Amino acid sequence: MSKQLGQRIFDELEKIVLIDPHSHINPHSAASETLADIMGYHYYTELAHAAGLPRERIEEPGLDPKEKVSRLVPMLAALDNTVQVSWLIEMCREFFDFTDDRITPDNWESLYDTAASRMAEPDWEDRVLKQSGLERVFLTNDFDDPLEGFNTDRYIPCLRTDDLVFHLAKPETQERLAKASGIEPVDCGSVVRAIGQLFDHFKSRGARACAISLPPDFHPGPVDQSTVEPILQSMLGGRSVLTEDESQVVSRFVFWTLAEMCAEHRLPFDLMIGVNRRVYEDGVHQGQDLFDSRTSLLQYRALFNAFPQVTFPVSVLAQTSNQELVSYSWIFPNVVTNGHWWYSNIPAYIELDCRSRLEAVPRTKQIGYYSDMYKLEFALPKFRMYRQVLAGVLGRDFVIGRGWSEEEAVSLGRQVLRGNVETIFNC
Amino acid sequence: MSKQLGQRIFDELEKIVLIDPHSHINPHSAASETLADIMGYHYYTELAHAAGLPRERIEEPGLDPKEKVSRLVPMLAALDNTVQVSWLIEMCREFFDFTDDRITPDNWESLYDTAASRMAEPDWEDRVLKQSGLERVFLTNDFDDPLEGFNTDRYIPCLRTDDLVFHLAKPETQERLAKASGIEPVDCGSVVRAIGQLFDHFKSRGARACAISLPPDFHPGPVDQSTVEPILQSMLGGRSVLTEDESQVVSRFVFWTLAEMCAEHRLPFDLMIGVNRRVYEDGVHQGQDLFDSRTSLLQYRALFNAFPQVTFPVSVLAQTSNQELVSYSWIFPNVVTNGHWWYSNIPAYIELDCRSRLEAVPRTKQIGYYSDMYKLEFALPKFRMYRQVLAGVLGRDFVIGRGWSEEEAVSLGRQVLRGNVETIFNC
Amino acid sequence: MSKQLGQRIFDELEKIVLIDPHSHINPHSAASETLADIMGYHYYTELAHAAGLPRERIEEPGLDPKEKVSRLVPMLAALDNTVQVSWLIEMCREFFDFTDDRITPDNWESLYDTAASRMAEPDWEDRVLKQSGLERVFLTNDFDDPLEGFNTDRYIPCLRTDDLVFHLAKPETQERLAKASGIEPVDCGSVVRAIGQLFDHFKSRGARACAISLPPDFHPGPVDQSTVEPILQSMLGGRSVLTEDESQVVSRFVFWTLAEMCAEHRLPFDLMIGVNRRVYEDGVHQGQDLFDSRTSLLQYRALFNAFPQVTFPVSVLAQTSNQELVSYSWIFPNVVTNGHWWYSNIPAYIELDCRSRLEAVPRTKQIGYYSDMYKLEFALPKFRMYRQVLAGVLGRDFVIGRGWSEEEAVSLGRQVLRGNVETIFNC
């Protein structure tokens, strides 16, 4: 492929204004305040730690942001090959007039100060959104988030349900549920009603999706009420330690209830499949999770069959699961491919996954990318990385390989980047 | 790689006249009669359904072929990115003088009519074969197929054995076996003799392979006769519901018997490994099957060791199984790589699989491709897709990467496309 | 990427003098004496056997080397596509003035004779090392190797521990341990002390690593002494047949002890994960082992957490495990990526694995390649294959994709090829 062809397609894709269908943005503090908000992103702290920086140096209580950055900067020399650090450099060049190729002990301080002064400007958040070509951003809200005090048209609520499914045995989860719903959970019926209340609330505030991350061995299915009722009652009555089997019954029950609520409230249910939590126990914050590639979408067979009216945008953590995702989306009307998650979010894997999806999944059923970001500044480099890979695939496989016009190729790109987010999430 | 080099190699590969080593052609009606035969191929119905067309609209009883096509056509806009639809366009352009890039509600009807009139010409079947560069085609025959009334030199019988291995508990399977073999199956001995009769019959009609598709968790092995005998006798005596363990014993016994017959009758045994049937229960016909990538050729260890005299052409459904297939073929004399099956049959996966096989498996042990087609018209675009990928790999990895001459590269291509089909299946 | 760019980077990488961090070199006979030493490498014998040469023809007792080569040569026509045979041709061209593209029944004999005379020259070993740009070579030493009579500065000892972990039930292993350590193993305490002695000895002779290959289902963890003590005592007391559970307890105990010794003696512990031994029972020597891709680094969670002070250079046999390796190295400070092992050691897989590692693992934590060779002559073609892939990735992904200078790209290549071997193994 000529460099020019790829560049032309990329330039067209860069013009597309986006809705980001999954992020961890805090809508009350969406943009960064210092470079420490950017470099404190777990990708950098965990890579710096993996390369040798002690966790205590990174997570020292009360650490001044500038001091934190000064500790992380020397580690960048060991990390400059990573695509994650390439995002960092790109942010600094795009937003802070940084002109060097690398951030070093010699040049970081002026960069830090420039960034801080830019970020302090009152319209910083708006400018980042505009410069990033970003119109709306999906959030990841705790189930008891009041969803107040922010513009829900710009920051779209999304009901995150990990705590309900996997941590309902904890008294604080039960209390949060009671408080958020106004219903004391004491048995199956009240748990279902309480969850229904959450959905009502989220829907009334414009939520466009329910979401959850799931361990590789999770196997959803309907649970017999006579099985779950005694466990749930005793658990909600104060028995916080459950056997593994009992925990599973509760998780399956709550999960299935969520799927029923998604059906009732016409919400897509984002499944992010495959994460094992706290594998590296002494890792930095959010840098402890890994995965087991031995997982299969076959585990979701009962779910996909039972809820034809619910759309399941599915993300897989293991790249080796991508072919299953392609195949299940090719067959099941209610399964759609969703972005490139976490450990699969690097160009080598995005390219293969993007190619296979574009070759075999209906074009209406592919959500190309989401940022997964914690701070707004990350959308630009992350989406740009994806647009570069996408432009290459469109150029090579469609324009050259199949004789499509460049307009047709860009139109396919636009659909997976933006159009399908609108149609699938009804936003 | 220059475009010219790839094109030159592709042009040479296109000249090779083929024997298609696996299809589902009905030799009594090998070519299509209307466009509905082509667009009724499960790839299109399942993709259309996955993109939103209700199954009832596709599978309405008594549906007129033209009406069926008219219902499918509007869905193509959602599917035009897929490689499967690119086959469709290619067939229409090659066979029916179609000149547009897409089939739409505006242009489909004249295409339908042109196709119907072409297909009605008396030499249509021959012309398709000739235009496709196809000399002989392997079939997939039910075990009780009389194999009569067609040219078995052109359409080569292949004994498909799924029903025997996985559905012998069904009375109709037992009856079919009794009728086809002339032997009433009542115990191990009579089952073995009956199966032997099938092999005799198939061999006498020119069969060149025995074949079976297998679920991901199948684990073949020899079965102790004292274990299987009582189960088999009770099952054949009328007990049609078996426990899962009993079913497995029967399946393993029949499967092992088939391998013994392959040894005795000197037939290769095609193993198509990894399909789960009826995963999507409400899917369209043949659009219900998926897979679980958690499978391993290690499950076939006992088989490959026990039958050194039987050649096993192995297809894997999960692309993640390809490396095992490469490695097992590199070590076991009796394991050979066979095509790119179903969900792995898209260029992104074919390319990676083709490269790894050409790099590490003896060139004599690779069957490059089969069509898996139900109607003859599909051979052309499917084999062409493969030839394009193959030409790219030969050009990049062998001519440029290793300094081979183009003739040497084409010769390698010829061997995997045609030569090995002849030697491995003795045809 | 222009051919010139890739070539320039490759030329620079070719200048780097290497330390080979894993081989099976016999330091008392490091180079080959005849072409049979090269063609007797299991890659050729197993491929020739897989392509049809009976094992008896290859492994006939007392077979003359020249006769052995004469039997293997005719098989090369079936194998000339493999990258392994491309190494062979490259060795012959580089070392023996061979000018043909293929070794055939017509030209092999003069090649054999030329090789034999070259190999007979007194400085052959030194010349091979020099011509290959190889400075030091890690060995794979039996735990009872006296490590005497060779230059341990050139040939660096490495303590291989498979026998201890998996074959301690065998009386000969116990005897070897007793003899090598001077301690009679009779219980946990004496086994630990005996193993400690081995570490002392190896360290005193300059060992730089402990190493082991592990089956896909191995799951290390600490073992309760009250569990292992009675099993170990009875086993060491003469009971050589253990249940599978008992074997596992012993293996886990010894493995954990090795990790403790690595911590105490500050040695990296090379883990080569994923091989099943003797899968093809009638295969040629070293051509019997395969794998099961259903394995996960999650099985090593307890180990990686328990020994933060031990560096684990990890090799995976299944290419499908590479993403886990990338992710675990990205998170765990003590996990580093190590080469491309065996069935993953072909360009199609190296390329994908190399790209993903360079994109997501700290550059300080990647050991690019090792030869795994049995004879010195193999280093040149094997490392060259890797350097070619690496040059391509550096050119495409870093120089073109990220705008790095060629010098920066080469510097990254130098670090993974050489620098990290020095820092990680402290040599």
Image (cartoon, coloured by chain):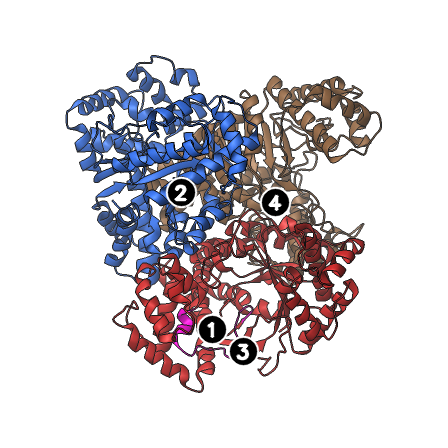
Chain colours: A blue, B red, C brown
Question: Is B24 included in the stretch rendered in magenta?
Answer: yes
Give the residue at mark 2.
A260
Give the residue at mark 1.
B375
* Viewer-closest of C396 and B35: B35
Numbered label attached to residue C292? 4
| Residue C219 x %, y % | 62, 32
Query: CA–CA distance between discs 1 and 2?
Result: 42 Å
Residue placed furthest toward the top: A62
Give the residue at mark 3.
B27
| Residue B151 x %, y % | 58, 82
Query: CA–CA distance between discs 2 and 4?
Result: 38 Å
> Is C410 above or below relative to A390?
above
Q: Residue at x 26, y 32 (%)?
A: A376
Chain under callout 3? B
Q: Which residues are magenta?
A: B20-40
| Residue B207 x %, y % | 64, 73
